[in-house]
Structure formats: structure tokens, C-alpha cells
Amino acid sequence: QQPVQSPQAVILREGEDAVINCSSSKALYSVHWYRQKHGEAPVFLMILLKGGEQKGHEKISASFNEKKQQSSLYLTASQLSYSGTYFCGTSTSGTYKYIFGTGTRLKVLA
Amino acid sequence: KAGVTQTPRYLIKTRGQQVTLSCSPISGHRSVSWYQQTPGQGLQFLFEYFSETQRNKGNFPGRFSGRQFSNSRSEMNVSTLELGDSALYLCASSPGSGNEKLFFGSGTQLSVL
């Protein structure tokens, strides 16, 4: 029941774009995205709710396809600070628990 | 506003012992969740407490237990430690009304020898 993230790892050069996908076998109500740098706590990026719109900032955005039970995180014009492990967390309707994927390790090189 | 505080930061125990980890949530947050993080497994959900009641539980054996106090602080206990329990244990707090962002602590790194 753990969501599947792909790719497992990605290496980019500064300025390149990346897409991280998160798929679940269950009907989802919400998807969270977090980034964790080595030795630090995961930090919240954004929440997408069922029926909501695509969210994000100028360079980091995400979408949620309810029918496919998938979410994608888009990193545009990557910066060195984007390096870390990205986790998606999913919840189903009526629950207060968030099940996280195994993570995607992203490294941005100068 | 102070963040989520977990103590201790590091623990070394031997097989068969038990351990108690502590988590102090952000002031005003009533929900505390616990996760086990190991390389390759990501964040595995242990349980979630809200207003001193366990509201959700993951698929961990009964050796893993928790509780929450009236001030929302939470403790997690692992009895009869096994080598496989070595992991980073993270707690996260939120207001508790659902579908809200989680604030994570820096975790307790547990090593079982």
C-alpha cells in the first residue's frame, strides 16, 4: 500500500528540469510532498487535495490525477539547493494517516 | 514558535532492551505521528495520536507502542529490541483537523547492537 515513486534517483545539472512521480494502488484524497536533506528533518513543500488545482511556486509545482491515483512533482530550472530526497505522502478519505513512498534521491550538480 | 523537539538525538541499545523516545510538538498542535525511517524503506507509519487517543495505527508489531499526554507531548516505546529496529525515528505534529502539513522533528537515531 506504500505509494511507488519514480525514478528512485536522478542527477541533474543546474538549470535542468526534473519530474518525480508518485503512484498509489488506492483511491487518494490528498497527496503531500516533502524534501529531506541529509541529516535533517523532512520539510513540507505542498499539499494537493482531491478536486483541487495544480499547486506550486514558480519553479516547483505539482499535479494530482485522481483518476489515475498519481501525482507528479515538477522541478524547473533546478538549483543546487534542490538536492535532497523527495517523498510523497498519501492519505485516503476519512483518515488522518499519511503513507509515504520510498523516496526519490535528487542531486543537482554545478 | 519552537519547532518539533525529539529527544534524545542518538541512542545505542542492545538486543532485548527497551527504549522510550520523546516528542514535543509545536505549541497548539494536537496530533503527533511517528515514523520509522530506514534506507530503502522510506518513512514507515507507526501510529498517530490526537488528544491522548491513538487515532491511527500502522503495521508494526505490538512491541511498538506509544502514548500522548494532555499537553500533546508524545512518547514511543519499543520493547525487546531487535537488530532490525535500528532506524531513524521521526515524529511529526500538526493541528490535527486533517489534510494539513506535517512538521517533522529531527528524529532520534536508534542503533541496536
Image: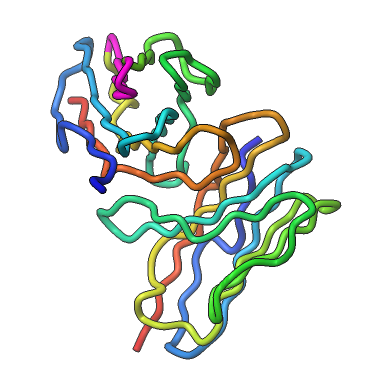
Is A105 on the left or on the right of B56, as rendered? left
Depth order, front residue of A9/A58? A58
Whether residue B71 is in magenta: the answer is: yes
Is A108 on the left or on the right of A74, as rendered? left
Q: Is residue B10 above or below residue A45?
A: above
Image quarter for residue B88? top left
Could you tell me which residue is drawn at 50 percent across and 60 percent down? A104
Q: Is residue B8 above or below residue B3?
A: above
Q: Quadrant of the C terminus of chain B?
A: top left
Is A5 on the left or on the right of A45, as rendered? right
Q: Is residue A97 above or below residue A43?
A: above
Could you tell me which residue is drawn at 35 percent across and 17 percent down? B68
Depth order, front residue of B72/A71? B72
Scheme by which the image is coloured: rainbow
Could you tell me which residue is drawn at 73 percent across and 42 percent down? A28
The segment highlighted magenta reads B70-80
Could you tell me which residue is drawn at 16 percent across and 19 percent down? B14
Is B30 on the left or on the right of A58, as rendered? left
Residue A100 in the image, given as x and y percentages of width and height: 54, 43
Q: Is residue A80 above or below residue A88?
A: below
Residue B9 in the image, given as x and y percentages of width and height: 16, 38
Residue B46 in the image, given as x and y percentages of width and height: 46, 25
The mark tally for this picture is 0
Depth order, front residue of B55/B63? B55
Residue B96 in the image, given as x and y percentages of width and height: 50, 32
Whether residue B12 is in magenta: the answer is: no
The residue furthest right is A67
